[in-house]
Image (cartoon, rainbow, N blue to C red):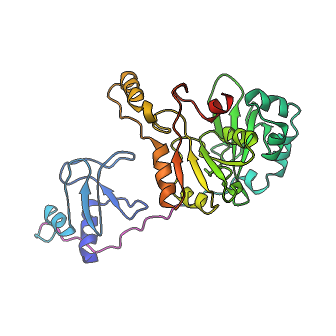
């Protein structure tokens, strides 16, 4: 496809390039204007498509629609604007020099008391995983860093020897239960500590993973920090640790392990509470399949009948 044809089309439509080399513009077929976060029309050197009216095809067909080359319009040939590459997000200040912040969390006077109020962890587990208490770092729009007003239970997350996240557990009754410091990155928590030939559990709550390893030192555990945060490359990362068996034990709900034998009952409840809404995808089976493709012996945990809806590993450990 000649560049001249694309240039001619661009001179008529005047699309603004996005980072994928696609040029959103007003659709010449249905008139839909391009707006951020909405479906619309666009073109590239591969052709055109409108996600509103469904029009699509090659550049010759688009040129014919625009009457280019039929005498009505003789456009100049100007170079297309190049999409700007995404700017890398700067590494958060607390990640480059975390010792002072972690020391503050570690030296909180009520550290062990507050942690054992949340979960029945041993002092050794609090020390081993560097659990702390303190204020979380955040950044304003003008770039200035500040610390939260209230204290949080803090969990530092490491990936390949680098601190990548600080997760905070709310100790109050209002606001989100969990929050991450600005500049945190998602990581498969504790994957670096998975022992070869061990039984490894995949759970949602990062502290439940710690509790499990505290109660069962012969086992390993990793946390996804949620049911929907799984990344497929984590399967390869976990497989590299060579566990003998991985048990996927997300919560007993639809977006977690999917409900298992209780799935039909949970779907009926969901439809009653959310009429017309799509049924959440079960992420536990997805994780297990990704791990199997990576060469791991992975099995899905089947929650017992007496486990309540949304039960997690903490319920199993407490019972």
In the image, the segment drawn in magenta is 72-86
Q: Nearer the viewer, residue 227 or 144?
A: 227
Quadrant in the picture for residue 60: bottom left
Toward the viewer: 235 or 185? 235
Please report the residue visible at 53 percent of the width from the left and 59 percent of the height from the top: 233
Magenta-span inclusion, residue 80: yes
Question: Does residue 8 appear anywhere in the picture?
Answer: yes
Q: Nearer the viewer, residue 179 or 223?
A: 223
Image coordinates for residue 160, horizontal then vertical, percent: 69, 60
Quadrant of the snapshot with the N terminus = bottom left
Q: Is residue 98 left or right of residue 54?
A: right
Most extreme residue toward the left is: 70
State the image quarter where residue 269 is shown: top left
Placement of the C terminus among the 4 image quadrants:
top right
Residue located at (58% from left, 60% from top): 239
| Magenta segment includes 53 | no
287 in relation to 309, above or below:
below
Relative to 175, 50 lies left or right = left
Relative image position of residue 67 (x, y in whole percent): 13, 64
The percent position of residue 295, horizontal first and vertical second, equals: 52, 62
Overall secondary structure of the magenta section: loop
- Expressed as whole percent of the image width and height from the top left, the position of residue 205 reads 63, 39
Image side of residue 151 versus residue 30, left or right:
right
């Amino acid at each position: 496809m000649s560049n001249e044809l694309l240039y001619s089309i661009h001179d008529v439509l005047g699309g603004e390039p996005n980072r994928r080399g696609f040029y959103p513009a007003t659709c010449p077929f249905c008139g839909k204007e391009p707006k951020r976060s909405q479906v619309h029309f666009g073109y590239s050197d591969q052709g055109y498509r409108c996600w509103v009216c469904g029009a699509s095809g090659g550049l010759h067909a688009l040129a014919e629609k625009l009457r280019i080359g039929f005498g009505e319009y003789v456009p100049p040939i100007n170079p297309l604007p190049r999409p700007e590459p995404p700017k890398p997000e700067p590494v958060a200040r607390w990640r480059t020099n975390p010792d002072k912040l972690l020391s503050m969390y570690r030296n909180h006077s009520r550290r062990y008391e507050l942690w054992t109020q949340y979960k029945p962890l041993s002092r050794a587990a609090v020390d081993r995983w560097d659990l702390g208490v303190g204020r979380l770092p955040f950044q304003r729009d003008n770039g200035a860093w500040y610390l939260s007003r209230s204290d949080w239970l803090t969990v530092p997350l490491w990936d390949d020897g680098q601190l990548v996240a600080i997760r905070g557990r709310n100790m109050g009754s209002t606001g989100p239960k969990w929050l991450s410091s600005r500049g945190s990155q998602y990581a498969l928590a504790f994957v670096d500590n998975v022992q070869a030939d061990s039984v490894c559990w995949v759970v949602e709550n990062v502290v439940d993973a710690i509790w499990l390893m505290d109660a069962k030192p012969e086992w390993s555990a990793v946390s996804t920090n949620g049911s929907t945060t799984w990344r497929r490359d984590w399967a390869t990362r976990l497989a590299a640790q060579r566990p003998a068996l991985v048990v996927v034990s997300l919560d007993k709900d639809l977006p977690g392990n999917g409900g298992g034998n209780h799935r039909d009952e949970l779907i009926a409840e969901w439809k009653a509470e959310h009429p017309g809404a799509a049924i959440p995808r079960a992420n536990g089976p997805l994780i297990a399949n990704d791990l199997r493709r990576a060469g791991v012996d992975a099995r899905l945990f089947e929650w017992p009948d007496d486990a309540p809806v949304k039960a997690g590993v903490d319920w199993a450990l407490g019972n």
